[in-house]
Image (cartoon, rainbow, N blue to C red):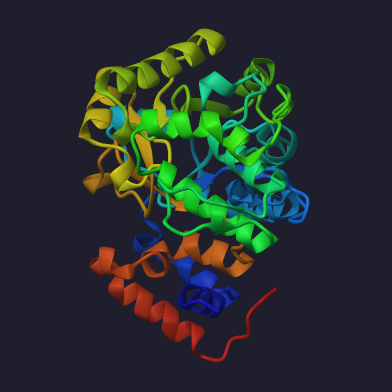
């Protein structure tokens, strides 16, 4: 069990939650939840990349129930109105976001969001909306999972021949290939992806991705009911790995497409992959110059109103392997669970919370 999980379980009790609700300073900071897919799946038969599944529908329901009870959920539009009016953000502000534009955001997440009257933002990869072409990470996972080869050498990736016999071997290969793609120039990765099905002797039907992505009709329907949409580029390249001209096209065209489809201004952008090394100052500058008000990364953290960069906002990840306790602790005590050294001015509150937790309370289910 990880240290984060141990700490989360210690903190997951009603007395600590009461302490948290009463502690104004401790609740400060905007949490931006980062989801991808909300889906039930069978690990042995799921054909694509399960690493982007953030929660099952049941887990998502419980998570949103907790969010509704403990936070004031706002949108980027609400945030912008606060900024324009010079108002303080809510003490317990939280934004729910989804990356990519998978259709299960509509079929599985949207009904739950509606049930709790929770707004959310979905960042769309516009080149895939209404299309059947798989995202590149899903295409890699499909090829590796469906190859009949028992081993394969990718000399540009590893000097070792990769075993493809067991499911665990294939998961390792997927992880290795995706990691390599994120570090090489876009032209190199595109050529690799084009050749991969032939290299692995896998047939990929043209309609393989049918029903995987949102349609524009579904986007328009959600847009009428508390769901904002933002840009996640046109093709989901690693922005640090592409030319300046392509970078501008990815940012400008995605925003223009969504605004044309919805007839609304688009305020927010999510950088693909989104770690610090995967976008750069040029991407931030272009986002600002082309009318975005906010851009989110995939770095973990909380946003504080007096000291934040609107074009590099961190988020709180949601992963399918997270326990209920870890989900709650990440939101209530991100300063402790995600790295307390980043917010030393709140150290006293952390100590008080841990003292309460150590006072003999039993963890709740």
Image check: 307 left or right of 321? Answer: left
Q: Is residue 227 above or below residue 147?
A: above
Q: Is residue 122 visible?
A: no
Image check: 336 left or right of 94? Answer: left
Q: Residue at x 37, y 75 (%)?
A: 350
**Residue 154, position in %: x, y?**
48, 47
- The residue nearer to you, when weighing 264 against 230, is 230
Q: Image quadrant of residue 245?
A: top left
Q: Quadrant of the C terminus?
A: bottom right
Q: Image quadrant of residue 270?
A: top left
- The residue nearer to you, when weighing 338 against 304, is 338
Q: Is residue 109 above or below residue 249?
A: below
Q: Residue at x 27, y 69 (%)?
A: 341
**Residue 295, position in %: x, y?**
35, 34
Q: How many numbered dots are placed on residues in this image?
A: 0
Q: Is residue 172 visible?
A: yes
**Residue 152, position in %: x, y?**
57, 51
- The residue nearer to you, when weighing 309 against 92, is 309
**Residue 76, position in %: x, y?**
43, 32
Q: Residue at x 50, y 83 (%)?
A: 357
Q: Residue at x 24, y 67 (%)?
A: 345
- The residue nearer to you, when weighing 119 against 155, is 155
Q: Quadrant of the N terminus?
A: bottom right
Q: Is residue 203 above or below residue 28?
A: above
């Amino acid at each position: 069990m990880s240290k984060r999980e141990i700490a989360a379980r210690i903190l997951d009790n009603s007395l600590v939650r009461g302490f948290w609700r009463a502690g104004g300073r401790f609740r400060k900071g905007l949490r931006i939840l980062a989801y991808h897919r909300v889906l039930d799946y069978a690990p042995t038969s799921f054909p694509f990349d399960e690493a982007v599944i953030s929660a099952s529908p049941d887990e998502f329901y419980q998570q949103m129930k907790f969010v509704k009870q403990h936070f004031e959920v706002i949108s980027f539009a609400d945030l912008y109105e606060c900024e324009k009016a010079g108002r303080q953000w809510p003490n317990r502000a939280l934004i729910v976001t989804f990356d990519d534009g998978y259709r299960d955001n509509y079929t599985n997440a949207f009904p739950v969001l509606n049930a709790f009257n929770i707004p959310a933002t979905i960042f769309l990869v516009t080149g895939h909306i209404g299309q059947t072409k798989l995202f590149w990470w899903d295409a890699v996972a499909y090829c590796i999972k469906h190859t009949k080869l028992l081993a394969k050498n990718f000399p540009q990736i590893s000097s070792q021949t990769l075993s493809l016999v067991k499911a665990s071997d294939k998961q390792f290969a997927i992880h290795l290939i995706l990691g390599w793609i994120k570090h090489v120039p876009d032209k190199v990765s595109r050529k690799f992806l084009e050749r991969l099905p032939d290299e692995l002797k896998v047939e990929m039907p043209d309609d393989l991705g049918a029903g995987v992505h949102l349609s524009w009709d579904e986007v328009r329907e959600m847009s009428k009911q508390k769901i904002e949409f933002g840009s996640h580029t046109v093709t989901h390249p690693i922005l640090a790995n592409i030319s300046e001209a392509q970078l501008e096209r990815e940012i400008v065209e995605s925003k223009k497409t969504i605004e044309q489809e919805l007839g609304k201004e688009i305020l927010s952008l999510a950088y693909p992959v989104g770690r610090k090394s995967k976008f750069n100052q040029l991407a931030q500058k272009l986002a600002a110059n082309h009318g975005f008000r906010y851009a989110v990364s995939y770095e973990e953290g909380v946003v504080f109103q007096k000291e934040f960069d609107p074009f590099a906002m961190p988020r709180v990840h949601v992963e399918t392997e997270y326990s209920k306790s870890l989900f709650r602790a990440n939101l209530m005590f991100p300063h402790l669970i995600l790295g307390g050294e980043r917010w030393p001015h709140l150290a006293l509150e952390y100590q008080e919370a841990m003292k309460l937790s150590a006072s003999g309370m039993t963890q709740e289910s």
